[in-house]
Image (tube, rainbow, N blue to C red):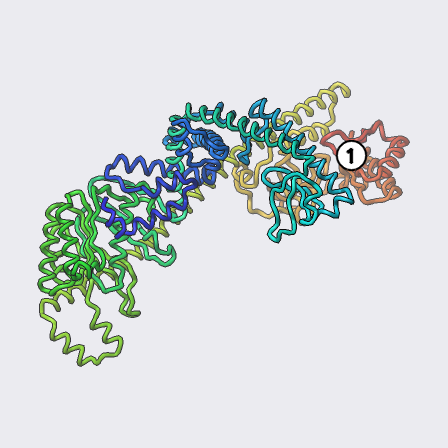
Amino acid sequence: MNLKILQTLEYTKVIQILVRHASTSLGKELAEALVPAAELEECKRRLQATDEAFKVDRLKGGAPFGGIRDVRQPLHRARIGGMLNPVELNDIGGTLLGGRRLRRFLLEIHEESAVPLLAELAELLQDNKALEDKIRSCIDDNAHVLDQASPELGKVRAELRAGEGKVREKLEQMVRTPSIAKMLQDSLVTIRNDRYVIPVKQEYRGHFGGLIHDQSASGATLFIEPESVVQMNNRLRELKLKEEAEVEKVLRLLSALVAEFADPLNGNLELLAELDFIFAKAGLAREMKATLPMMNDRGFLKIKRGRHPLLSREAVVPLDVELGNKYSTIIITGPNTGGKTVTLKTIGLLSLMAMSGLFVPAEDGSQLCVFDAIYADIGDEQSIEQNLSTFSSHMTNIISILRDMTPKSLVLFDELGAGTDPAEGSALAISILEHIHQMGCRMVATTHYSELKAYAYDRKGVINASMEFDIQTLSPTYRLLVGVPGRSNAFAIAERLGLSRRIIEHARQQVGEEDQRVESMIATLEENRLSAEAERNAAEELRREVEAMKRKLEEERRRFDEQREKLLLKAEQDAAQAVAKARKEAEEVIADLRRMAMEERGSIKEHKLIEARRRMDLAAPQLTDKLKKTASGPKKTEVIEPGDEVLVISLNQKGHLVEWAGTNEALVQLGIMKMKVSRKDLQLVASKPETKAPAQRVAPGVKRTRDENVRMELDLRGQNLEESIMEVDRFLDESFLSNLGQVYIIHGKGTGVLRTGISDYLRRHKHVKSYRLGNYGEGGTGVTVVELQ
């Protein structure tokens, strides 16, 4: 790809941003050298690698590249027998560790979410753990050779530290001696020329003997090595030389080991550079909020809401353009500063980015093409040195393009034919466009010539486009309108700015009839476009509403299905519980009947059978009101009055209504019993006869007062013990006279005082055969069940 084209389309500026995202100098080097590829498979491979790195970046926040250095030079010197210094060896060890860490990271990611290209590169990284451990055992993180690097080095350094300690101790004793301290400039021990010395005043230089190694800038202080420590310092110097020799042995040994692994290490560096470069592309995509484009090699591109990557995301107007399907050439017209040049650069730059394996700042679903080359003639390139005018400069560039282009090229022209006579310039522009169009190139050109608008209408595969201009605000909107040529807005702008209408009309008369016809046609097209756009927006809004409604209905249906399943499951569970409860109650009733049959030897009293039947009916699963209505049919609408024959639905027993007891309850005579039932539990069987029945002859016998109030249970809750005893006595007498065998006294649980008092009373009562507390289902300890004589 021509470097001049890359600069013209500002591709190099994108590369500068890419370089900043690389973590290592190796990755930065690859990013700087990135150029577009001209083969479809290579572009797809590059984009796939970027996509995988983008996925890792999204899931894990990037890859670890810490510790990786460019150690190609040290590796080369080690290969030719050179000795590496501790810093270089430390960098090599850090690079080995960083590569091993990165390899493990990528392979673990691949197990969670497939990233095959990155995993393939990671697998190729060689794990030189032995060399890494050897370097780490000899050199620390501060690039200092450790004592344990060799036994001899450890021994020498131990002796060296002991000797240094003795020398310092000897000198510190001297500086602490009062007679000597007054001769010293400072009471300290320091080092000059790798030997321990003390600072002595100039006038006492002869009192110490030894060697003078240095003096202060003023000459008032001499740094003297006393004669008493000269031999000791000489020994230290010998030990330091031995230490240096041992360190050199260690470094040469490590350098030889590195030389053995030089080729694998260089291979690792290439892989690490490639991985860093790939993750840099992912970082650029994240910064630009770019997406993965679809690629083809058939000359088709479709940019959806594309943005120039170097312009502010908030300020730029998105670009929608399609090229290479119905038409291969777009001719863009419109006013200056309307965005034509930016449109050209955006199309070219996004194509270059996609061919380089970079995501493009556009919406998902954008398609771009792999061109063998992209050519552009953009901007004023006149040259004083070469004595070239604007027109000459453009023509020189265009001639070069026409010579090099192929049918698989993309050609971008800005202001084609400008800089010369309009008539000749437009004719030349049409001729150039026709030549390129016949070759089959994909081309986008901008112009001011109205003749090119007519050319686009007459030529198949060529389409007009324009940059939208708002007449109301006298400013461009920077929107590209494909299919609509640009209008000359000079008259409209002049009129809005206040130019005399007479002058404007005179100017219109100067315009040729053909030009007026073209302008009129463009105006009509503009009106039709605005109308169609409004209708399309309305249809789009309606479509969104329908889709929203559809989503809402689908969501409601889903919730309905879930609720139905839950209700069915709950109904099955409730039914199973109801059946189990009914079965248990039935078994208890049968057991009670058997027990009563055994105790009373077949003479079971009628009220006990009725009570057992009532318990059986109550054990049945309770239906809702709606199901009851369905099962029993609609209730009769006749008014039930006292004396009417009624059916108690829950007991399936017929009786007579005695009276209404409140709003929702009724007192019903069932055989010898009277009981309160719910108003809803009654069904009219027959009304009482209209004629009054003849008076019956009263048979002689015992008169039962309060017979109409006989009941099987007595509720004493809320009463005190004295009142309760009186009620219990009256209740037991009435129950005995009514031939009841068993009654229930409800006293509640409470503190137990009422239960205890009633139990004491029942123990002494003459009609009581036995009594007990209620069982489960009878009220428990809150009820006493009394069996009468």
Q: In the drawing, does residue 624 fall left or right of residue 199?
A: left
In the picture shown, does residue 272 fall above or below 554? above
Q: In the drawing, does residue 109 fall left or right of residue 385?
A: right
Query: Which quarter of the figure has residue 728?
Result: top right
Report the front residue among 411 and 627. 411
Report the front residue among 206 and 626. 206
Badge 1 crowding class, 10 Å Cα cut-off, few under 14, some 14 to 19, many 20 or more, is: many
In the picture shown, does residue 68 fall above or below 450? above
Percent x, y of residue 264? 39, 26
Q: Quadrant of the C terminus?
A: top right
User: Which residue extends farthest front?
Assistant: 206
Report the front residue among 393 and 201. 201
Residue at disc 1, secondary structure: strand
Report the front residue among 167 and 667. 167
Three-letter amino acid code at the position of disc 1:
Tyr
Q: Is residue 101 visible?
A: no
In the picture shown, does residue 21 fall above or below 234? below
